[in-house]
Image (cartoon, coloured by chain):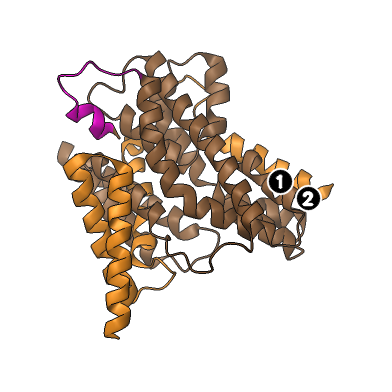
Chain colours: A orange, B brown
Amino acid sequence: MTELAVLAVIGLGTYAMRAAFIVTARAAPAGLARLLPHVGPAVLAAITLPALLAPRGTIALAETLPALLAAATAVLLWRRDGRLPVALFGGLGVWWLAGLAAVSLV
Amino acid sequence: MSRVATTSTGTPAIGPVRQGCRDSPGVVVAYVPFGVALGATLATTSVHPLLAWSSSPLLFGGAAQLLAVQLIDAGAGPAVVVLGALVVNARMLLYSASLAPHTRDWPTRWRWAGPFLLADPVYALALGRFSRPDGGGRARDRLTYYLSVGLTLWVAWLLLTAAGALLAGALPAALPLELAAPQSFLLLLLPMLTSRPAYVAAALGGTVAVIASGLPLGLGLLIGAAAGVGAGALTAGARDD
């Protein structure tokens, strides 16, 4: 079954990349070590920002503004009580309301 | 969330397993729409549903699974499928390098087994904990936390994508939940913004990723991440001089 073999090879290759720096207990060379602290903020922002500005693939006022309002709500809720599900659904609620408002205005 | 632990002063510190089990559900909830939608999408291709779903335990990463199954569906050659999916997953190299300073004191067998569970949300939760002032605790605590989070999300991912495959066709067409995952990543990102270089890395990484978001194979993410890492290092270097 070639298809299963293809998926297994991708799985192996992905595992190799996941394990590349973790299996060895040696410290990273100084040049690389200087870059590592910035990976977290950079990658997570690169995942988050495009998806927040264009939740359905395009940046447009009627799409982007409700999404930003929702994100701001989620951040505020999370700052207040620290529970991710509460913040998440609060944000989604604002997003739905703002989406309805945007539709009815246009 | 790491925030839970910091606000619960006065109560005894809770163990890493319980903390991991407490941090995971929020992220699982955030992954429900993506997991279910992905499972449904995979099941509607010409690839056998069970085979398509087997990409969940094998790859444990939605973007690469989607690309691989869609390329197979479109009749692309094996080499193209493998290369495309590996480019999508290339960010795992970054995650591996970024976590390595915190995993060096783990037992060897766990340094081999642990990476299997490394995915976007696992990385974000683990790094969030390891970046705390106490470094996330002793080696054993860090390992237990990582494994609790990783296993919870791995099992949840298998179940969510399976549910999506079984429900394919019965799902409402436009359930507006696209924002759930980016919102949760935003909440995982914020606690990492503790210094000027971190802000610069995030600002540039996000902006460049937006500009490059039209590129295929998730390359926009990789280019944004590279730009952010470089900018963060430059900012930190400039402060040291």
Give the distance between the C-alpha atoms of the residues marked 2 and 1, in whole angstroms.
Answer: 6 Å
Q: Which residue is rendered at x = 18% and y = 44% of the image?
A: A79
In the rendered image, which quarter is residue B169 located in? bottom right
Look at the image and tell me in which quarter the C terminus of chain B lies: top left
Residue situated furthest right in the rendering: A1
In the rendered structure, the residue with mark 2 lies on which chain? A
Q: Are marks 2 and 1 on the same chain?
A: yes
Image coordinates of residue B15 in percent, x first then y, are 34, 17
In the rendered structure, the residue with mark 1 lies on which chain? A
* In the image: residue B201, left or right of residue A9: left
Q: Check the image and report above or below for B27 versus B149.
A: below
Q: Is residue A4 magenta?
A: no
- Which residues are drawn in magenta? B2-15
Residue nearer the viewer, B228 or B157: B157
Residue situated furthest bottom in the rendering: A106
Disc 2 crowd rating (10 Å Cα; few below 14, some 14-19, many 20+) is some
Q: Which residue is rendered at x = 24% and y = 64% of the image?
A: A69
Number of marks in the rendered image = 2
Residue nearer the viewer, B35 or B118: B35
Q: Which residue is mark 2?
A: A3
Q: Which residue is rendered at x = 74% and y = 48% of the image?
A: B51
In the rendered image, which quarter is residue B196 located in? top left
Image coordinates of residue B7 in percent, x first then y, are 18, 30
What's the mark number on residue B129? none
Assess whether mark 1 and mark 2 are in contact (beta carbons under 8 angstroms). Answer: yes
Q: Check the image and report above or below for B157 versus B115.
A: below
Residue situated furthest front in the rendering: B170
Q: Which residue is mark 1?
A: A7
